[in-house]
Image (tube, rainbow, N blue to C red):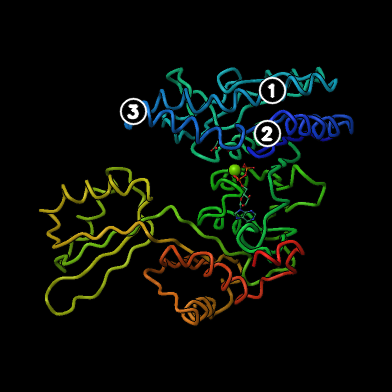
Protein backbone atom coordinates (compact mmCIF):
# COMPACT_ATOMS: atom_id res chain seq x y z
CA UNK A 1 0.00 0.00 0.00
CA UNK A 2 1.55 3.26 -1.15
CA UNK A 3 0.90 6.85 -0.18
CA UNK A 4 0.57 8.89 -3.37
CA UNK A 5 -0.02 12.54 -4.17
CA UNK A 6 -1.85 12.87 -7.51
CA UNK A 7 -1.91 16.33 -9.09
CA UNK A 8 -4.30 17.25 -11.90
CA UNK A 9 -3.69 20.31 -14.08
CA UNK A 10 -6.12 22.81 -15.59
CA UNK A 11 -7.00 20.92 -18.77
CA UNK A 12 -7.68 17.78 -16.73
CA UNK A 13 -10.09 19.72 -14.47
CA UNK A 14 -11.86 21.73 -17.20
CA UNK A 15 -15.54 20.82 -16.79
CA UNK A 16 -17.71 18.27 -15.05
CA UNK A 17 -17.01 15.42 -17.47
CA UNK A 18 -13.27 15.73 -17.00
CA UNK A 19 -13.60 16.05 -13.23
CA UNK A 20 -15.62 12.83 -13.26
CA UNK A 21 -12.84 11.17 -15.26
CA UNK A 22 -10.31 12.40 -12.69
CA UNK A 23 -12.50 10.98 -9.91
CA UNK A 24 -12.55 7.63 -11.72
CA UNK A 25 -8.74 7.65 -11.94
CA UNK A 26 -8.41 8.47 -8.25
CA UNK A 27 -10.91 5.71 -7.43
CA UNK A 28 -8.75 3.21 -9.29
CA UNK A 29 -5.79 4.10 -7.06
CA UNK A 30 -7.96 3.86 -3.93
CA UNK A 31 -9.40 0.51 -5.05
CA UNK A 32 -5.84 -0.73 -5.58
CA UNK A 33 -5.26 -0.05 -1.88
CA UNK A 34 -3.29 3.21 -2.08
CA UNK A 35 -3.74 6.13 0.30
CA UNK A 36 -4.31 9.20 -1.82
CA UNK A 37 -4.11 12.97 -1.51
CA UNK A 38 -5.10 14.91 -4.61
CA UNK A 39 -3.92 18.39 -5.56
CA UNK A 40 -5.94 20.24 -8.18
CA UNK A 41 -5.53 23.26 -10.46
CA UNK A 42 -8.28 25.65 -11.44
CA UNK A 43 -10.12 24.85 -14.69
CA UNK A 44 -8.02 25.74 -17.75
CA UNK A 45 -8.33 29.46 -18.51
CA UNK A 46 -9.94 30.26 -15.17
CA UNK A 47 -6.90 31.80 -13.49
CA UNK A 48 -6.31 34.02 -16.55
CA UNK A 49 -9.93 35.13 -16.32
CA UNK A 50 -9.58 35.98 -12.63
CA UNK A 51 -6.29 37.83 -13.21
CA UNK A 52 -8.06 39.91 -15.87
CA UNK A 53 -10.85 40.83 -13.49
CA UNK A 54 -8.24 42.18 -11.08
CA UNK A 55 -6.57 44.18 -13.86
CA UNK A 56 -9.91 45.59 -14.94
CA UNK A 57 -10.77 46.57 -11.39
CA UNK A 58 -7.44 48.37 -11.04
CA UNK A 59 -4.15 48.12 -12.91
CA UNK A 60 -2.46 48.45 -9.52
CA UNK A 61 -4.56 45.89 -7.64
CA UNK A 62 -3.61 45.29 -3.99
CA UNK A 63 -1.63 41.98 -4.15
CA UNK A 64 -3.40 40.71 -1.01
CA UNK A 65 -6.79 41.12 -2.67
CA UNK A 66 -5.40 39.81 -6.00
CA UNK A 67 -4.55 36.59 -4.13
CA UNK A 68 -8.06 36.38 -2.67
CA UNK A 69 -9.45 36.55 -6.20
CA UNK A 70 -7.07 34.25 -8.08
CA UNK A 71 -7.02 31.56 -5.35
CA UNK A 72 -10.75 31.09 -5.96
CA UNK A 73 -10.30 28.97 -9.11
CA UNK A 74 -8.75 26.12 -7.17
CA UNK A 75 -11.33 26.31 -4.40
CA UNK A 76 -14.04 25.51 -6.93
CA UNK A 77 -12.28 22.52 -8.52
CA UNK A 78 -11.32 21.08 -5.12
CA UNK A 79 -14.94 21.13 -3.99
CA UNK A 80 -16.17 19.73 -7.29
CA UNK A 81 -13.70 16.86 -7.23
CA UNK A 82 -14.67 15.98 -3.64
CA UNK A 83 -18.33 15.91 -4.78
CA UNK A 84 -17.48 13.74 -7.80
CA UNK A 85 -15.47 11.33 -5.65
CA UNK A 86 -18.31 11.01 -3.14
CA UNK A 87 -20.71 10.38 -6.03
CA UNK A 88 -18.38 7.60 -7.20
CA UNK A 89 -18.55 6.04 -3.72
CA UNK A 90 -15.16 7.27 -2.52
CA UNK A 91 -15.17 9.12 0.85
CA UNK A 92 -13.48 12.47 0.21
CA UNK A 93 -13.25 16.02 1.49
CA UNK A 94 -11.59 19.24 0.43
CA UNK A 95 -8.89 20.92 2.54
CA UNK A 96 -8.37 24.54 1.55
CA UNK A 97 -4.96 26.16 1.92
CA UNK A 98 -6.00 28.05 5.06
CA UNK A 99 -7.61 24.97 6.57
CA UNK A 100 -4.61 22.63 6.46
CA UNK A 101 -2.88 25.11 6.65
CA UNK A 102 -0.27 25.45 3.90
CA UNK A 103 2.00 28.06 5.54
CA UNK A 104 3.74 30.39 3.12
CA UNK A 105 5.83 33.55 3.10
CA UNK A 106 3.88 36.79 2.81
CA UNK A 107 5.17 37.57 -0.71
CA UNK A 108 1.69 37.90 -2.18
CA UNK A 109 1.26 36.44 -5.71
CA UNK A 110 4.73 34.82 -5.53
CA UNK A 111 4.64 33.26 -2.05
CA UNK A 112 6.90 30.36 -1.05
CA UNK A 113 5.64 27.36 0.88
CA UNK A 114 7.31 27.17 4.30
CA UNK A 115 5.48 24.29 5.98
CA UNK A 116 2.38 22.16 5.59
CA UNK A 117 0.49 20.87 8.60
CA UNK A 118 -0.50 17.36 7.61
CA UNK A 119 -2.00 16.14 10.90
CA UNK A 120 -5.59 16.71 9.76
CA UNK A 121 -5.32 15.01 6.42
CA UNK A 122 -3.24 12.12 7.74
CA UNK A 123 -5.99 11.38 10.28
CA UNK A 124 -8.61 11.66 7.53
CA UNK A 125 -6.61 9.37 5.26
CA UNK A 126 -6.36 6.85 8.09
CA UNK A 127 -10.17 6.88 8.16
CA UNK A 128 -10.11 5.98 4.46
CA UNK A 129 -10.86 9.46 3.14
CA UNK A 130 -9.26 10.98 0.07
CA UNK A 131 -7.93 14.49 0.77
CA UNK A 132 -8.52 16.99 -2.03
CA UNK A 133 -6.23 20.02 -1.77
CA UNK A 134 -6.47 23.09 -3.99
CA UNK A 135 -3.04 23.86 -5.43
CA UNK A 136 -1.53 27.34 -5.82
CA UNK A 137 -2.89 28.71 -2.51
CA UNK A 138 -1.61 29.10 1.01
CA UNK A 139 -1.78 31.15 4.18
CA UNK A 140 0.66 33.83 5.37
CA UNK A 141 1.46 34.42 9.04
CA UNK A 142 -0.60 37.58 8.73
CA UNK A 143 -3.63 35.31 8.35
CA UNK A 144 -4.17 36.26 4.72
CA UNK A 145 -4.55 34.05 1.67
CA UNK A 146 -1.50 33.83 -0.62
CA UNK A 147 -0.81 32.34 -4.05
CA UNK A 148 2.42 30.79 -5.29
CA UNK A 149 2.93 32.26 -8.77
CA UNK A 150 1.59 30.93 -12.06
CA UNK A 151 1.86 27.18 -12.49
CA UNK A 152 2.21 26.88 -8.70
CA UNK A 153 -0.03 23.85 -8.22
CA UNK A 154 2.90 21.65 -9.23
CA UNK A 155 4.81 23.08 -6.28
CA UNK A 156 1.83 22.56 -3.95
CA UNK A 157 1.78 18.89 -4.98
CA UNK A 158 5.50 18.34 -4.45
CA UNK A 159 5.45 20.19 -1.12
CA UNK A 160 2.51 18.08 0.05
CA UNK A 161 4.27 14.89 -1.09
CA UNK A 162 7.38 15.94 0.87
CA UNK A 163 5.36 16.80 3.98
CA UNK A 164 3.41 13.52 3.83
CA UNK A 165 6.59 11.57 3.03
CA UNK A 166 4.63 10.17 0.09
CA UNK A 167 6.01 7.30 -1.96
CA UNK A 168 5.30 9.20 -5.19
CA UNK A 169 4.08 12.50 -6.58
CA UNK A 170 2.29 11.93 -9.87
CA UNK A 171 1.67 15.04 -11.99
CA UNK A 172 -1.19 14.37 -14.42
CA UNK A 173 -1.32 16.83 -17.30
CA UNK A 174 -2.43 17.17 -20.94
CA UNK A 175 0.69 15.53 -22.43
CA UNK A 176 1.88 12.07 -21.45
CA UNK A 177 5.30 13.05 -20.14
CA UNK A 178 8.30 15.28 -20.57
CA UNK A 179 9.35 15.49 -24.21
CA UNK A 180 12.59 16.51 -25.90
CA UNK A 181 10.78 19.78 -26.60
CA UNK A 182 7.22 21.13 -26.48
CA UNK A 183 5.30 18.50 -28.48
CA UNK A 184 2.81 21.19 -29.53
CA UNK A 185 5.57 22.92 -31.50
CA UNK A 186 7.54 19.90 -32.71
CA UNK A 187 5.34 16.87 -33.38
CA UNK A 188 8.54 14.83 -33.82
CA UNK A 189 9.48 15.48 -30.19
CA UNK A 190 10.23 12.26 -28.29
CA UNK A 191 8.92 11.35 -24.87
CA UNK A 192 11.70 10.81 -22.34
CA UNK A 193 11.29 7.75 -20.11
CA UNK A 194 13.55 9.42 -17.55
CA UNK A 195 15.09 12.82 -17.02
CA UNK A 196 17.44 13.95 -14.26
CA UNK A 197 16.29 16.52 -11.67
CA UNK A 198 19.11 18.77 -12.82
CA UNK A 199 18.01 18.71 -16.46
CA UNK A 200 14.33 19.08 -15.61
CA UNK A 201 15.14 22.03 -13.36
CA UNK A 202 17.14 23.74 -16.09
CA UNK A 203 14.51 22.98 -18.77
CA UNK A 204 11.72 24.35 -16.56
CA UNK A 205 13.70 27.47 -15.72
CA UNK A 206 14.29 28.24 -19.40
CA UNK A 207 10.65 27.89 -20.34
CA UNK A 208 9.42 24.26 -20.51
CA UNK A 209 6.27 24.91 -18.51
CA UNK A 210 5.32 21.25 -18.11
CA UNK A 211 6.56 21.57 -14.50
CA UNK A 212 6.93 24.77 -12.50
CA UNK A 213 10.63 25.41 -11.76
CA UNK A 214 10.14 25.59 -8.01
CA UNK A 215 8.40 22.23 -7.95
CA UNK A 216 11.45 20.56 -9.46
CA UNK A 217 13.78 22.43 -7.12
CA UNK A 218 11.78 21.22 -4.15
CA UNK A 219 11.50 17.64 -5.45
CA UNK A 220 15.27 17.55 -5.86
CA UNK A 221 15.92 18.95 -2.40
CA UNK A 222 13.38 16.72 -0.65
CA UNK A 223 14.08 13.65 -2.83
CA UNK A 224 10.43 13.40 -3.90
CA UNK A 225 9.81 10.68 -6.50
CA UNK A 226 8.24 12.74 -9.27
CA UNK A 227 6.45 11.46 -12.34
CA UNK A 228 4.72 13.29 -15.24
CA UNK A 229 1.77 11.45 -16.80
CA UNK A 230 -1.30 12.07 -18.92
CA UNK A 231 -4.72 12.28 -17.35
CA UNK A 232 -6.19 11.31 -20.73
CA UNK A 233 -4.36 8.02 -21.33
CA UNK A 234 -2.65 5.22 -19.48
CA UNK A 235 0.61 5.62 -21.37
CA UNK A 236 3.74 5.37 -19.24
CA UNK A 237 5.01 8.85 -18.31
CA UNK A 238 8.38 10.37 -17.49
CA UNK A 239 10.16 9.69 -14.23
CA UNK A 240 12.38 12.45 -12.82
CA UNK A 241 15.46 10.73 -11.35
CA UNK A 242 18.81 11.40 -9.70
CA UNK A 243 21.84 11.55 -11.97
CA UNK A 244 23.11 8.25 -10.56
CA UNK A 245 19.89 6.50 -11.67
CA UNK A 246 20.12 7.72 -15.27
CA UNK A 247 21.98 5.11 -17.30
CA UNK A 248 21.48 6.09 -20.92
CA UNK A 249 22.85 9.57 -20.97
CA UNK A 250 22.21 11.58 -24.14
CA UNK A 251 24.19 14.67 -24.95
CA UNK A 252 21.09 16.90 -25.02
CA UNK A 253 17.93 16.17 -23.02
CA UNK A 254 15.81 18.84 -24.63
CA UNK A 255 15.17 22.21 -26.24
CA UNK A 256 13.00 24.90 -24.62
CA UNK A 257 11.81 28.38 -25.50
CA UNK A 258 10.60 31.38 -23.54
CA UNK A 259 8.68 34.31 -24.98
CA UNK A 260 8.38 36.08 -21.66
CA UNK A 261 11.53 38.16 -21.74
CA UNK A 262 12.19 41.60 -23.21
CA UNK A 263 15.51 43.13 -24.27
CA UNK A 264 16.84 46.50 -23.15
CA UNK A 265 19.88 48.15 -24.72
CA UNK A 266 21.62 51.12 -23.15
CA UNK A 267 23.62 52.93 -25.80
CA UNK A 268 26.61 55.14 -25.03
CA UNK A 269 27.31 54.02 -21.47
CA UNK A 270 30.59 55.51 -20.10
CA UNK A 271 33.16 52.68 -20.05
CA UNK A 272 34.44 53.03 -16.49
CA UNK A 273 34.52 50.97 -13.29
CA UNK A 274 31.28 50.89 -11.35
CA UNK A 275 28.95 51.76 -14.19
CA UNK A 276 27.53 48.25 -14.53
CA UNK A 277 26.72 48.26 -10.82
CA UNK A 278 24.92 51.58 -11.33
CA UNK A 279 22.71 49.90 -13.96
CA UNK A 280 21.92 46.65 -12.22
CA UNK A 281 21.79 47.92 -8.63
CA UNK A 282 18.56 49.92 -9.06
CA UNK A 283 17.01 47.08 -11.10
CA UNK A 284 17.76 44.62 -8.30
CA UNK A 285 16.38 47.06 -5.72
CA UNK A 286 13.14 47.08 -7.71
CA UNK A 287 13.06 43.24 -7.58
CA UNK A 288 13.63 42.96 -11.34
CA UNK A 289 15.29 39.71 -12.30
CA UNK A 290 17.85 40.39 -15.03
CA UNK A 291 18.65 37.31 -17.09
CA UNK A 292 21.01 37.62 -20.08
CA UNK A 293 23.67 40.36 -20.11
CA UNK A 294 25.97 41.46 -22.94
CA UNK A 295 28.46 44.30 -22.67
CA UNK A 296 30.18 45.45 -25.82
CA UNK A 297 33.78 46.55 -25.93
CA UNK A 298 34.74 50.18 -26.00
CA UNK A 299 34.99 51.28 -29.61
CA UNK A 300 37.64 53.84 -28.73
CA UNK A 301 35.23 56.62 -27.73
CA UNK A 302 35.20 55.81 -24.02
CA UNK A 303 31.64 54.47 -24.22
CA UNK A 304 30.09 51.06 -24.56
CA UNK A 305 26.63 49.51 -25.12
CA UNK A 306 25.02 47.22 -22.50
CA UNK A 307 22.22 44.84 -23.48
CA UNK A 308 20.23 42.68 -21.08
CA UNK A 309 16.88 40.96 -20.70
CA UNK A 310 14.16 41.38 -18.07
CA UNK A 311 10.80 39.64 -17.61
CA UNK A 312 8.47 41.10 -20.22
CA UNK A 313 5.85 42.00 -17.64
CA UNK A 314 8.48 44.12 -15.87
CA UNK A 315 9.64 46.02 -18.98
CA UNK A 316 7.65 49.21 -18.17
CA UNK A 317 8.94 49.16 -14.58
CA UNK A 318 12.52 48.54 -15.80
CA UNK A 319 12.36 51.50 -18.18
CA UNK A 320 11.04 53.67 -15.40
CA UNK A 321 13.83 52.58 -13.02
CA UNK A 322 16.51 53.17 -15.67
CA UNK A 323 15.06 56.55 -16.57
CA UNK A 324 15.33 57.62 -12.94
CA UNK A 325 18.92 56.32 -12.77
CA UNK A 326 19.90 57.98 -16.04
CA UNK A 327 21.90 60.84 -14.56
CA UNK A 328 24.00 58.46 -12.44
CA UNK A 329 24.65 55.97 -15.26
CA UNK A 330 25.06 58.60 -17.96
CA UNK A 331 23.84 56.59 -20.99
CA UNK A 332 22.93 58.33 -24.25
CA UNK A 333 19.92 56.31 -25.35
CA UNK A 334 17.72 53.41 -24.24
CA UNK A 335 16.25 50.94 -26.74
CA UNK A 336 13.55 48.53 -25.47
CA UNK A 337 12.61 45.51 -27.60
CA UNK A 338 9.83 43.11 -26.60
CA UNK A 339 10.03 41.23 -29.91
CA UNK A 340 12.51 38.64 -28.66
CA UNK A 341 12.50 35.03 -27.52
CA UNK A 342 15.03 32.87 -25.74
CA UNK A 343 15.81 29.40 -27.05
CA UNK A 344 17.85 27.00 -24.92
CA UNK A 345 19.37 23.54 -25.21
CA UNK A 346 19.86 21.56 -22.00
CA UNK A 347 21.77 18.37 -21.22
CA UNK A 348 24.08 16.98 -18.55
CA UNK A 349 26.13 15.47 -21.38
CA UNK A 350 27.46 18.97 -22.08
CA UNK A 351 29.63 18.73 -19.00
CA UNK A 352 31.92 16.31 -20.76
CA UNK A 353 31.48 17.23 -24.44
CA UNK A 354 32.90 20.16 -26.35
CA UNK A 355 31.17 21.67 -29.38
CA UNK A 356 27.57 21.77 -28.14
CA UNK A 357 27.35 25.57 -28.43
CA UNK A 358 29.12 25.56 -31.82
CA UNK A 359 26.49 23.12 -33.17
CA UNK A 360 23.75 25.47 -31.97
CA UNK A 361 25.29 28.58 -33.52
CA UNK A 362 25.96 26.80 -36.83
CA UNK A 363 22.42 25.38 -37.08
CA UNK A 364 20.87 28.81 -36.45
CA UNK A 365 23.27 30.56 -38.84
CA UNK A 366 22.40 28.07 -41.61
CA UNK A 367 18.78 29.26 -41.31
CA UNK A 368 19.78 32.93 -41.24
CA UNK A 369 18.69 33.35 -37.60
CA UNK A 370 20.63 36.13 -35.90
CA UNK A 371 21.78 35.68 -32.29
CA UNK A 372 21.36 38.80 -30.15
CA UNK A 373 22.69 37.51 -26.81
CA UNK A 374 24.09 34.29 -25.37
CA UNK A 375 24.25 32.79 -21.88
CA UNK A 376 25.57 29.45 -20.76
CA UNK A 377 25.68 27.29 -17.66
CA UNK A 378 27.36 23.94 -17.14
CA UNK A 379 24.42 22.10 -18.69
CA UNK A 380 22.70 24.79 -20.81
CA UNK A 381 23.24 27.16 -23.73
CA UNK A 382 20.65 29.91 -24.33
CA UNK A 383 20.40 32.38 -27.20
CA UNK A 384 18.19 35.39 -27.68
CA UNK A 385 16.62 35.73 -31.14
CA UNK A 386 13.82 37.67 -32.85
CA UNK A 387 10.47 36.26 -31.74
CA UNK A 388 9.25 35.42 -35.24
CA UNK A 389 11.96 32.74 -35.55
CA UNK A 390 11.30 30.94 -32.30
CA UNK A 391 9.40 27.95 -33.67
CA UNK A 392 11.81 27.54 -36.58
CA UNK A 393 14.78 27.73 -34.21
CA UNK A 394 13.32 25.09 -31.87
CA UNK A 395 12.68 22.72 -34.81
CA UNK A 396 16.11 23.31 -36.34
CA UNK A 397 17.92 22.67 -33.05
CA UNK A 398 15.81 19.62 -32.30
CA UNK A 399 16.99 18.15 -35.60
CA UNK A 400 20.58 19.38 -35.23
CA UNK A 401 21.03 17.45 -31.96
CA UNK A 402 19.47 14.29 -33.39
CA UNK A 403 16.41 14.45 -31.15
CA UNK A 404 13.73 13.93 -33.82
CA UNK A 405 11.59 10.83 -33.43
CA UNK A 406 8.74 9.56 -35.55
CA UNK A 407 6.09 12.19 -36.27
CA UNK A 408 2.60 11.05 -35.23
CA UNK A 409 0.59 10.27 -38.39
CA UNK A 410 -1.99 13.02 -37.90
CA UNK A 411 0.74 15.60 -37.31
CA UNK A 412 2.43 15.18 -40.70
CA UNK A 413 -0.01 17.59 -42.37
CA UNK A 414 0.72 20.28 -39.84
CA UNK A 415 4.43 20.34 -40.56
P1 LIG B 1 -1.18 21.80 -16.47
O1 LIG B 1 -2.37 22.66 -16.67
O2 LIG B 1 -1.51 20.34 -16.43
O3 LIG B 1 -0.32 22.24 -15.32
P2 LIG B 1 0.64 23.07 -18.33
O4 LIG B 1 -0.02 23.73 -19.49
O5 LIG B 1 1.14 23.91 -17.22
O6 LIG B 1 -0.32 21.92 -17.81
O7 LIG B 1 1.89 22.20 -18.86
C1 LIG B 1 1.70 21.24 -19.88
C2 LIG B 1 2.16 21.83 -21.21
O8 LIG B 1 3.57 22.04 -21.19
C3 LIG B 1 1.96 20.93 -22.41
O9 LIG B 1 0.65 21.07 -22.93
C4 LIG B 1 3.04 21.38 -23.39
O10 LIG B 1 2.52 22.23 -24.40
C5 LIG B 1 3.99 22.21 -22.53
N1 LIG B 1 5.39 21.81 -22.66
C6 LIG B 1 6.42 22.67 -22.88
N2 LIG B 1 7.57 22.01 -22.98
C7 LIG B 1 7.31 20.70 -22.80
C8 LIG B 1 8.10 19.51 -22.80
N3 LIG B 1 9.43 19.55 -22.97
N4 LIG B 1 7.48 18.33 -22.61
C9 LIG B 1 6.14 18.27 -22.41
N5 LIG B 1 5.33 19.35 -22.42
C10 LIG B 1 5.90 20.56 -22.61
N1 LIG C 1 -4.21 27.86 -11.67
C1 LIG C 1 -2.86 28.39 -11.50
C2 LIG C 1 -2.33 28.90 -12.82
O1 LIG C 1 -3.02 28.83 -13.82
C3 LIG C 1 -1.94 27.39 -10.88
C4 LIG C 1 -1.72 26.13 -11.68
O2 LIG C 1 -2.57 25.74 -12.49
O3 LIG C 1 -0.68 25.47 -11.48
O4 LIG C 1 -1.25 29.42 -12.87
MG1 LIG D 1 1.18 23.72 -15.15
Q: Is mark 2 within 8 Å of ligand 1?
A: no
Sequence order check, earlier mark of 3 and 2: 2
Disc 3 versus disc 2: distance between alpha carbons? 29 Å
Tell me where residue 355 appears, x and y as whole percent: 53, 80
Q: Residue at x 85, y 20 (%)?
A: 89
Q: Is residue 282 left or right of residue 79?
A: left
Sequence order check, earlier mark of 1 and 2: 2
Verify CB contact (< 8 Å) between mark 1 and mark 3.
Answer: no
Q: Identify the disc placed on residue 13.
A: 2
Q: Residue at x 15, y 61 (%)?
A: 331
Disc 1 versus disc 2: distance between alpha carbons? 9 Å
Which residue is situated farthest in the front direction here?
A: 413
Q: Secondary structure at mark 1?
A: helix
Q: Is residue 319 left or right of residue 58?
A: left
Q: Identify the disc placed on residue 176.
A: none
Does 403 appear above or below 120? below
Tell me where residue 115 appears, x and y as whole percent: 56, 29
> Which residue is label 1 attached to?
80
Verify CB contact (< 8 Å) between mark 1 and mark 2.
Answer: yes
Disc 1 versus disc 3: distance between alpha carbons? 30 Å
Does 165 appear above or below 71? below
Q: Residue at x 60, y 59 (%)?
A: 199
Q: Is mark 3 within 8 Å of ligand 2?
A: no
Tell me where residue 174 appears, x and y as whole percent: 69, 46
Which residue is situated farthest in the right direction here?
A: 32
Does 237 appear above or below 374? above
> Which residue is label 3 attached to?
58
Q: Residues within 10 Å of mark 3 (few under 14, many from 20)?
A: few
Q: Residue at x 34, y 46 (%)?
A: 314
Of residues 115 and 363, the one nearer the viewer is 363
Amino acid sequence: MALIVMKFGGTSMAGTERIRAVAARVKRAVDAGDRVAVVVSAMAGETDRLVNFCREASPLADPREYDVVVAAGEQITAGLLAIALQAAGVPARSWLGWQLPVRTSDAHSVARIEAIDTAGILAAMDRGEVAVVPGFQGLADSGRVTTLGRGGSDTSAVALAAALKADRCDIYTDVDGVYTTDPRIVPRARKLARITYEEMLELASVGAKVLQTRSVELAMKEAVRLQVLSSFSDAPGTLVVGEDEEMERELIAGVAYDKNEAKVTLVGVPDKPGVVAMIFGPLADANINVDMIVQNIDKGEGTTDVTFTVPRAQLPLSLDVLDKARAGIGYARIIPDANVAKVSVVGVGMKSHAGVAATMFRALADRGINIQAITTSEIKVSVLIAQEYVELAVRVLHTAYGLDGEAPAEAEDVL
